């Protein structure tokens, strides 16, 4: 049965890296629409508008648009629904969380020198939750894609064991599973640990069991159909704190700079049950993997807003790459049942992997806005990001060089379009927005295009404003169950629904 509570009795520093791949690199390279209710109500189309704390995180010139010092805080309820199709069988899962997803303040200082073209200066600190990693889905079905065991988890262990010596993946006499798992990991690394789990659980059979130098293996399962029950559960977020400075030059130009501190917290657990009735030596397999990731990073932004007229504004922002330092820990469990009886290998070991670097792609954004006096506005943002330039570092590492080549070949540049509008009637503001994000994958299916819309309402009390927004976005994923062996995909249709409440006020 699934081991929900793992007792960690050892910490292992690996000599080889954990298998980072495109999925990990992409996860920390994408941004979600977060922030204040007004910002979300316009689907984030704020690059030429300013005057909002979330706009400060988007375009650093935005804080200079404030006429008075300003602060805001936002609460959000995030509901995620996943509809999963795995070989024709549908399952659904929901996840709902409350969160403080935004907070910040901007302090505006008027220039009292009447002869200076610099009208005012601003300093701001803004916290933004840039990505929500809470996700939960389940794939249940019979994998009928038979052929060389590619539809069985046994192929995962077989692929890792290929070419490895038998004496490098088996227990020594008198060793416990935990001792062997730890020693093999310390001496040889992650790949050998996976082969060890497959061999010791009787999934793999050496061609020459009496030869320590044996490097060939067979699978103790017969080909056919395999029933899978796979669960995926993730929690965490990506956050950003921006230290902002901006200024207004004469009456029409706003310039700004953000220095950003980023942080990552991410936990993921996957659990697979596989059954077969193929008269195999192994008829039942459980396989669990747990990953915990923390990281910190730095980026900067340069931005400007220009009023071409009293009504028409343009904005331009450059987002630098984000340079992350990331740490990961992982643990595993496997159990099998068959002619050798029930075998359970629970090493109770946390693998602590060496730090690695990740450089996410930069981004360039252009914005247009038209303001209808005090009656309302229309705004449009366009941005482009080349995901194929994402890099795992050091690039001299052969494993990272291999993955970077995969990233370059699989990912592409992608555009984001955001459109928002606002209409004011007395103290009320009525808002709406639409956004479209292209797939970062060349194939357009591993991660599909995103479409979203938003509706919002605001009430102005004078120095204080209260805003409420509902927004929803849909994206489809073709997610491989594993990065080796069993790479058949579960097709997940994900819908994120958010209700955000913001309180903003002049200081």
Image (cartoon, grey):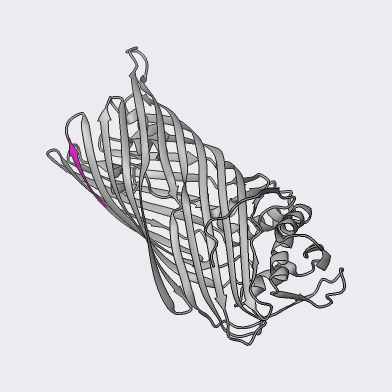
Report the residue that reaches farthest toward the front.
174
In the rendered image, the quadrant that contains the N terminus is bottom right
Instruction: Give the side of residue 488 with respect to residue 394, left or right.
Output: left
Q: Residue at x 51, y 41 (%)?
A: 263
Residue 68 % position (x, y)? 28, 24
Residue 417 % position (x, y)? 38, 53
- Quadrant location of residue 22? bottom right
Residue 477 % position (x, y)? 47, 65
361 or 175: which is nearer to us? 175
In the rendered image, the quadrant that contains the C terminus is top left
430 or 167: which is nearer to us? 167
499 or 60: which is nearer to us? 499
**Compared with residue 359, is residue 174 higher up or lower down, i.e. above or below?**
below
Q: Residue at x 32, y 46 (%)?
A: 76
151 or 23: which is nearer to us? 151
Can residue 289 be seen here? The reply is yes
**Compared with residue 247, is residue 504 higher up or lower down, i.e. above or below?**
below
Q: Which residues are magenta?
A: 455-460
Report the residue that reaches farthest toward the left.
426
Residue 10 % position (x, y)? 67, 49
Can residue 51 be seen here? The reply is no
Determine the main secondary structure of the stretch shown in magenta.
strand
Instruction: Give the side of residue 373 with respect to residue 78, left or right.
Output: left
Residue 398 part of the magenta-drawn span: no
Q: Residue at x 68, y 46 (%)?
A: 354
Number of labelled discs? 0
Instruction: Give the side of residue 169 with respect to residue 155, left or right.
Output: right
- Quadrant location of residue 464? top left
């Amino acid at each position: 049965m699934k081991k929900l509570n793992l007792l960690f009795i050892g910490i292992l520093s690996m000599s080889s890296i954990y298998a980072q791949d495109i999925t990990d690199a992409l996860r920390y390279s994408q941004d979600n629409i977060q922030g204040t209710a007004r910002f979300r109500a316009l689907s984030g189309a704020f690059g030429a508008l300013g005057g909002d704390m979330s706009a400060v995180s988007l375009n650093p010139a935005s804080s200079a648009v404030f006429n008075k010092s300003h602060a805001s805080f936002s609460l959000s309820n995030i509901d995620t629904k996943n509809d999963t199709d795995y070989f024709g069988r549908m399952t659904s899962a929901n996840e709902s969380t409350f969160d403080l997803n935004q907070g910040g303040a901007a302090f505006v200082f008027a220039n009292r020198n009447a002869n200076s073209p610099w009208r005012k200066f601003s300093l701001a600190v803004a916290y933004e939750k840039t990505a929500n990693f809470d996700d939960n889905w389940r794939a249940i079905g019979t994998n009928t894609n038979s052929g060389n065991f590619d539809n069985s988890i046994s192929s995962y262990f077989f692929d890792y064991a290929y070419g490895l010596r038998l004496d490098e993946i088996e227990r020594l006499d008198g060793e416990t599973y935990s001792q062997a798992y730890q020693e093999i990991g310390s001496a040889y690394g992650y790949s050998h640990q996976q082969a060890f789990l497959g061999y010791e659980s009787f999934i793999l059979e050496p061609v020459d069991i009496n030869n320590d130098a044996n490097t060939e293996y067979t699978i103790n399962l017969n080909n056919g159909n395999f029933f899978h029950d796979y669960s995926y559960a993730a929690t965490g977020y990506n956050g950003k704190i921006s230290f902002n400075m901006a200024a207004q030059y004469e009456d029409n130009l706003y310039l700004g700079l953000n220095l950003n501190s980023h942080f990552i917290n991410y936990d993921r657990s996957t659990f697979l049950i596989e059954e077969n009735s193929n008269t195999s030596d192994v008829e039942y397999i459980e396989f669990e993997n747990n990953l915990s990731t923390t990281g910190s990073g730095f980026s900067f932004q340069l931005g400007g807003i220009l009023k071409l007229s009293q009504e028409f504004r343009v904005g331009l922002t450059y987002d630098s790459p984000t340079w992350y330092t990331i740490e990961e820990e992982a643990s595993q469990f496997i159990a099998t049942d068959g002619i050798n009886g029930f075998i359970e290998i629970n090493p109770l070991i946390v693998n602590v992997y060496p730090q690695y670097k990740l450089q996410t792609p930069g981004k360039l954004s252009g914005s247009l806005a038209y303001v209808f006096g005090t009656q309302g506005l229309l705004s449009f943002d366009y941005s482009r990001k080349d995901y194929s330039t994402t890099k795992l570092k050091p690039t001299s590492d052969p494993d990272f060089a291999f993955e970077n080549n995969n990233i370059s070949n699989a990912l592409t540049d992608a555009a984001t379009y955001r459109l928002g509008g606002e209409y004011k009637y007395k103290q009320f503001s009525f808002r709406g927005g639409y956004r479209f994000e292209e797939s970062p994958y060349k194939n357009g299916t591993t991660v599909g295009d995103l479409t979203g819309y938003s509706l919002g309402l605001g009430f102005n009390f004078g120095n204080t404003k209260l805003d409420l927004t509902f927004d929803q976005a849909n994206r489809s994923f073709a997610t491989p169950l594993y990065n080796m062996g069993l790479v058949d995909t579960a097709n997940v249709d994900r819908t994120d629904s958010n209700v955000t409440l913001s309180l903003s006020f002049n200081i």
